Image (cartoon, coloured by chain):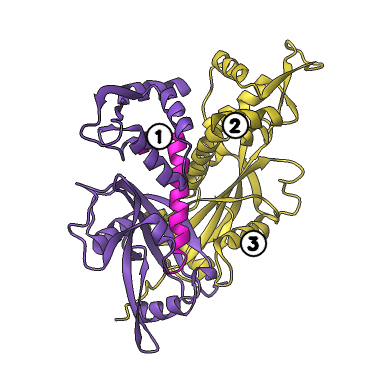
Chain colours: A purple, B yellow
Amino acid sequence: MPIALPPTCCISVNCVVLGFDSKKLNVLLEQREYLIDGKKVVDHMLPGGLMTDNEDLDEAATRLLHEKAGMRNLKMFQFKAYGSRSRIKGRNDIEWMKQQLGVEIVNPLTIGYASVGKIGRKLNLHNAPKGISWFPVEEALKMPLAFDHAILIQDAIKMLQYSIETDPIIVFNLMPLKFTALQLRTLYECIYRKELDVRNFKKKMKQYEYVVPLEEVEQGVAHRAARYYRFDRVKYKKYRRGMD
Amino acid sequence: MPIALPPTCCISVNCVVLGFDSKKLNVLLEQREYLIDGKKVVDHMLPGGLMTDNEDLDEAATRLLHEKAGMRNLKMFQFKAYGSRSRIKGRNDIEWMKQQLGVEIVNPLTIGYASVGKIGRKLNLHNAPKGISWFPVEEALKMPLAFDHAILIQDAIKMLQYSIETDPIIVFNLMPLKFTALQLRTLYECIYRKELDVRNFKKKMKQYEYVVPLEEVEQGVAHRAARYYRFDRVKYKKYRRGMD
């Protein structure tokens, strides 16, 4: 027997784009503008939007990131689907949906996609429309974000933590060709969202034979010049094979 | 400006329930019946169905598994969302949707949930309605399954492979309290979907201090009696902490 379809269901995609600027991990946010009682309200959301019938999820994520942030060719991975009435945080989300989509969706579903890279040549805002910008993750999480987008950001970072445990190469893709122990630790601290013990970190670093110390040290620094390291892909591949 | 919502979108949840019976990994499938040119066609699908507006994704998965397979209190995890026109494999899926849902959905979205356990006291078909049964994974993947359900099964198993690499406890939850090397290897072979080298496997097993050999051997077997092992949770926790 035919059953009625849910009346107001629609599928959106939201992208958590994480960009490392050598000091902080940043997240890309889009400004959201709408009226509450005739007054303009401005807050932020993750770039994203509705999926159309003519595309698949991955295509929707690619299209939306291009439309919303002018970014192309980013490697994105799907990390989780979010579907719950509690995604709507209050009147702000309801009003925004009404004004933006022309309808009130009671149980909006979104699929979270994530991408992580180093802010620079490939990952930048050169083609971005107005209203989209980087925010340090820790600041963004204190801002009034749309829907459950704060949870999506936290989940994407948890996924990143999990990924670097099984495949640390992700970390070295975010580093310059040569880096100091401090630079590497800074990145780990951003990803784990906490301070790490300096000594323990150095001890661990030494255990990884694919992190190779160079004869070179920092130049023109006021403090004691730190040694540079580089990531050795060949040694890393060997190390990975040894684990299998 | 209000935009039109996709006309025929709806969200379903499908569950890949994997059950180990000490010899094979099995997957739960539901019989699907519909008419093509007036003739009854029978094939199989993963248990699942549409999400309603009053529940969240996890609740829908729990409800549907109960409705479709009579199972309660299974630990399920979401592993991936699937949204693409190519999910519809042909006329069979279109006819089934028309007859079952009363509508043709052009771009059906499903969220894949997975659960893995040992067939027995908790994971069984005692309360299952007619038409639901276990199939060995390798057989199921050769059957004509609905939509992209064969891909969902393969992805859930890949996820399981990935999970046991980071947390092998999942494997020991599928073993009896004492087990032989052959029993453990059989499970690994089911999960990796390939034969493993006997010698390498034994060598690896010895490296894991949390797999403890017992003084006990198999009783009343025609072949040479194999030694029993047990999984030591305390040693395992120590081992895990050592890795951090």
Q: Earlier in the sequence, mark 3 or mark 2?
A: 3
Q: Which mark is residue A168?
A: 1
Which chain does the numbered disc 2 sit on? B
Instruction: Look at the numbered disc 1 and give the secondary structure of its residue.
Output: loop
Q: Percent x, y for residue B217? A: 78, 15
**Residue B96 seen in this snapshot:** no
**Mark 1, mark 3: which one is toward the viewer?**
1
Q: Which residue is mark 2?
A: B240
In this rendering, is residue B7 above or below A232? below
The CA span between labels 2 and 1 is 18 Å
Name the kind of residue labelled 3 in the image: Arg
Q: Which residues are magenta?
A: A145-171
Q: Nearer the viewer, residue A160 or A228?
A: A228
Q: Percent x, y for residue A63? A: 27, 59
Q: Is residue B98 magenta?
A: no
How many numbered marks appear? 3
Q: Is residue A153 magenta?
A: yes
Q: Residue at x 29, y 48 (%)?
A: A21
Q: Percent x, y for residue A203? A: 46, 26
The CA span between labels 1 and 3 is 38 Å
**Mark 3, mark 2: which one is toward the viewer?**
2
Q: Residue at x 41, y 22 (%)?
A: A239
Q: What residue occupies the far bottom of the structure in this picture?
A: A38
The CA span between labels 3 and 2 is 35 Å
Magenta stretch mostly in which secondary structure?
helix
Q: Which mark is residue B63?
A: 3
Name the kind of residue labelled 2 in the image: Arg
Instruction: Look at the numbered disc 2 and give the secondary structure of its residue.
Output: helix
Instruction: Look at the numbered disc 3 and give the secondary structure of its residue.
Output: helix
